[in-house]
Amino acid sequence: MEISDTIAERAGERTVIRLTAAHPASDMIDLRSDTVTRPSDEMREAAADAAVGDDVHGDDPTVAELEARAAEIVGAEAALFVPSGTMGNQIAARVHTERGQEAITDRESHVVRYERAGFAQHSALQIRTIDAERGLPTPEQVEAAYLEGGLHRPETGLLSLENTHNARGGLALDPDAFAETVAAAHDLGVPVHLDGARVFNAAVANDVDVTAYTEPVDSVMFCLSKGLGAPIGSMLAGSEAFIEAAIGIRKLLGGGMRQAGMVAAPGLLALENRDHLQTDHENATTLAAGLDEIEGLAVTPPETNIVLADTAGLDVTASTFLEAIEDEGVQASEFGPYTARFVTHWDVTAADIEAAIEAVQTRF
């Protein structure tokens, strides 16, 4: 059987999904991201049976239930269902700031690396980056980066933090250090937004309630469609006044949805069933240990569900490495010229992890 390559056009880039007779898509162990999870039968049934209304008019009961429950879990006054985490971050920046201000963030943060300069495009913000250890600026770094503004200089309008920190390998920030940094910004009168796409992973890793990260900040975004396993959507939470303003910005950005209860219902299930996150972390630890046995492959011990592997010692680029392991039935993603990223999730079992390790070891 011969299966030709499938070409997907996304954001002006060509993503090639290689399907081979030896390893059709259904047989692949997909560790590219935790966004690849497929909805469970229970989620599909919940979507089909969901009570719906027009959410732009505010009368979708399932969306309302999801928003209320999300706010309760993260200790916020209110929450808003948005199509994506990126949109949630962009809405937060627009609500918190005035045009021409600066946003402080780590130089490797998602809002800098992966959101197409959205802070500049949507909110007219200048970004002041900090090379922060583990991705968390210290209080001293926040104070040093802060600007009061004036005739010639912009003023600091926002501190944007990320937890877990994706580009730095899924690092789970220390709750006490996190709170100190947030307090330093607040002492300067600067609001703090948390890109908490995987904040529940951070809470599990540090054995704390998620509110240890979400209650100190002024707003938080977290994804339903990453580690939690829902097919679509993210949540943005904050004060009632913040969410009221956020609704208008969501509409401006094209995020107003109609009978959204059909995608909110799986999100509710995902939000209430988070026990698998610990298993994901354990699988990541097993995967890292197995990959690290390969001579020349340098693997960073994971803190959550993200494993980074440096291929330089194998004398191959990450791209070449990924092509080779895909031929063996394992998919991961390129995270730099010599960095491959593996992400565990609820669609991947312990047996899959052992099979993936064996497949990569066979090739290298």
Image (tube, rainbow, N blue to C red):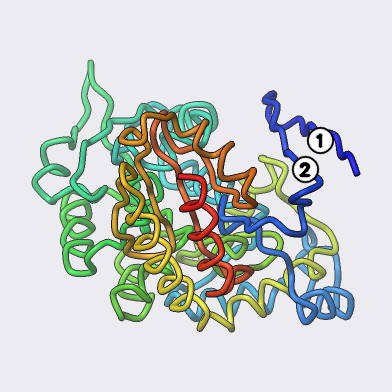
Task: Say if 138 sits above or below 151 in the image.
Answer: below
Q: Indicate the quadrant where residue 347 lies.
A: bottom right
Q: Does residue 159 appear in the picture of this structure? A: no
Residue depicted at 69% across the width and 32% down the height: 15
Give the labeled residue for mark 2. Answer: 19
Q: Indicate the quadrant where residue 93 lies.
A: top left
Picture quarter with the C terminus? top left
Dot 1 or dot 2: first in sequence order is 1
Residue depicted at 44% across the width and 40% down the height: 111
Image coordinates of residue 354 in percent, x first then y, are 51, 68
Q: Indicate the quadrant where residue 60 lies.
A: bottom right
What amino acid type is highlighted by mark number 1? Thr
Residue depicted at 47% across the width and 78% down the height: 279
Task: Say if 91 sits above or below 237 in the image.
Answer: above
Element under disc 1: strand
> Nearest the camera: 290 or 76?
290
Image coordinates of residue 146 in percent, x first then y, are 18, 37
Q: Is residue 37 left or right of residue 343?
A: right
Outermost residue to the top: 152
- Decide: marks 1, 2 in contact (CB < 8 A)? yes
Task: Say if 258 sits above or below 76 in the image.
Answer: above
Q: Does residue 33 appear in the picture of this structure? A: yes
Give the labeled residue for mark 1. Answer: 6
Task: Say if 189 sits above or below 26 in the image.
Answer: above
